[in-house]
Amino acid sequence: MANLKGLFKDTAIYGLSSIVGRFLNYLLVPLYTYYMPKDSGDYGISTNVYAYTALILVFLTFGMETTLFRFANEEQPGNTGLSGKPGNSGNSGNSGVPAPGRSWPDRVFSTAFATVGTLTVIFVALLFGFITPISQALGYADHPDYLLMMGVVVALDALQALPFSYLRFQKRPIRFASLKLLFIILSIGLNVIYFVVLGKTSVYYVFLINLLCTAIITLFFVPDLIRINWCFDASLLRRMLRYSWPILILGIAGILNQVADKIVFPLVYPDKALANVELGVYGSCVKIAMIMAMITQAFRYAYEPIVFAKSKDTDKTEYYAAAMKYFLIFTLLAYLCVVGWMPLLQYIIGADYREGLRVVPIVMAAEIMMGVYFNLSFWYKLIDKTIYGAWFSIIGCAVLFAVNILFIPKYGYMACAWGGVAGYGTAMVLSYVVGQRKNPIPYDLRGMAFYTGIAIVVFLLMNQAIALLPTWAALATNTLLIMLFLAIILRKSGNSGIAAPTNNQ
């Protein structure tokens, strides 16, 4: 299990960029919620537009990030042909032999990048060509500039996605983290200048600043792109597309599980005048809960390349089982830290927005389920049966949509929070049940249930402390409870070590 040490190290580096980046980004939440009045609905507009951009980004990247890892880890072509498999020439010409000096990973990257670049150009052309009907349909007829700015932002993000993934493939976490942090620092700095110094508090400037920062980061990839040995491989692309289209469906369903509530809310909330106001309250409180998404993302950045590289090792299933167990333990600990210190964390957002804080524990629970689902997803990726993931995510997304459409009119944004639990929970259970039949992995269910049960008990005690005790006493009590949970983890792990569970556990 030596590779676990590498996983923890890379997770720490990727997590540094993600954790520090999210922490700095949290500085924008008080900036926006203290400077943008709740009744203006500007924060709700920001939440809604960013939900659309997240969805569009999945379409433009077309599942090529995971596909890049899958194909770049194939055997270096030689006598077996460029695809790494006998009988496949895999090149854009007829020779079946890679050009001198062109590495197989570069060939995979450049083919994927050409695909994403083509989709991005088409998207930008359609957006600018049909901006009037698009802005009218989305409710921004008076502000098409919002959509144009964010359309360019999502196009640049799509162009950055594969270079960032290639840095992960090349095991260059320092450069990856540096660029991520640079974006955040630029964003924080410009937001402070515009909102605090210049007094520009409209949501327009939120979008403008994002456009400027994204454009600057894109320029930093120019040297990396120049060093690539560019080669488009049509035969390889056909194989990649067969692999990636189910991942695209999976990605669409997955991102809809994250943003559908923010897209649907203004459409079904009965009071249209208050829709963006209520969405702003929900969107600001969700920012606190996003620590779970941050941890999951950091783990994914480190874990995904290792999974594919380790797919031929004899101890792979034990490794996957151990990684799942320790992922769950870490996320439960983070969950309890956020809940226990909520009396302090609530000041991240302005007082007018704090009425929505009750959604935070629910949304974090949904994010833990999403992280578990991500860990469970590798069985079908490794056997090239990504269609299973597409179906699981589609079903989960359908559940989420149903909960939101049926219950938002009556329960408002609380329905959004519980919809995430229902959607992610459904996909998680389906992936586990089917995965254990198709590609069984000896997960330590008993151990994971034990830690989850202890976390639930601690969570309930923390809520009682917050409700009954003065703030200082509640914080002290909850800190002791967190330390108790950590002590239980260390004691149990010390007794069992970090070895993967066996089949009889």
Image (cartoon, helix red, strand yellow):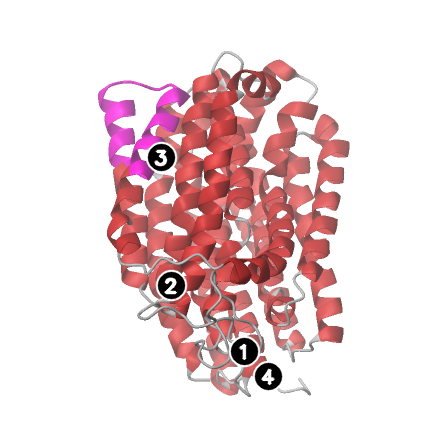
Task: Relative to 88, say whether 287 is above or below.
Answer: above
Q: Secondary structure at mark 3?
A: helix
- Alpha-carbon span between mark 4 and mark 1: 18 Å
* Residue identifier under label 3: 28
Label 2, residues with CA under 10 Å away: few <14, some 14-19, many ≥20: some
- In front: 48, or 110? 110
**Contact check, label 3 and label 1, Cβ < 8 Å:** no
Q: Residue at x 44, y 65 (%)?
A: 483
Q: Residue at x 52, y 28 (%)?
A: 126
Label 1, residues with CA under 10 Å away: few <14, some 14-19, many ≥20: some
Which of the 4 quarters of the picture holds residue 457? bottom right
Disc 2 residue type (three-letter): Asp
Disc 4 residue type (three-letter): Pro
* Residue identifier under label 2: 106
Label 4, residues with CA under 10 Å away: few <14, some 14-19, many ≥20: many
Magenta part of the protein: which range? 187-215
* Residue identifier under label 4: 501
Q: Look at discs 3 and 1 and give the one toward the viewer.
A: 1
- In front: 498, or 178? 178
Where residue 97 sits: x, y (%)? 43, 72
Q: Which mark is residue 51?
A: none
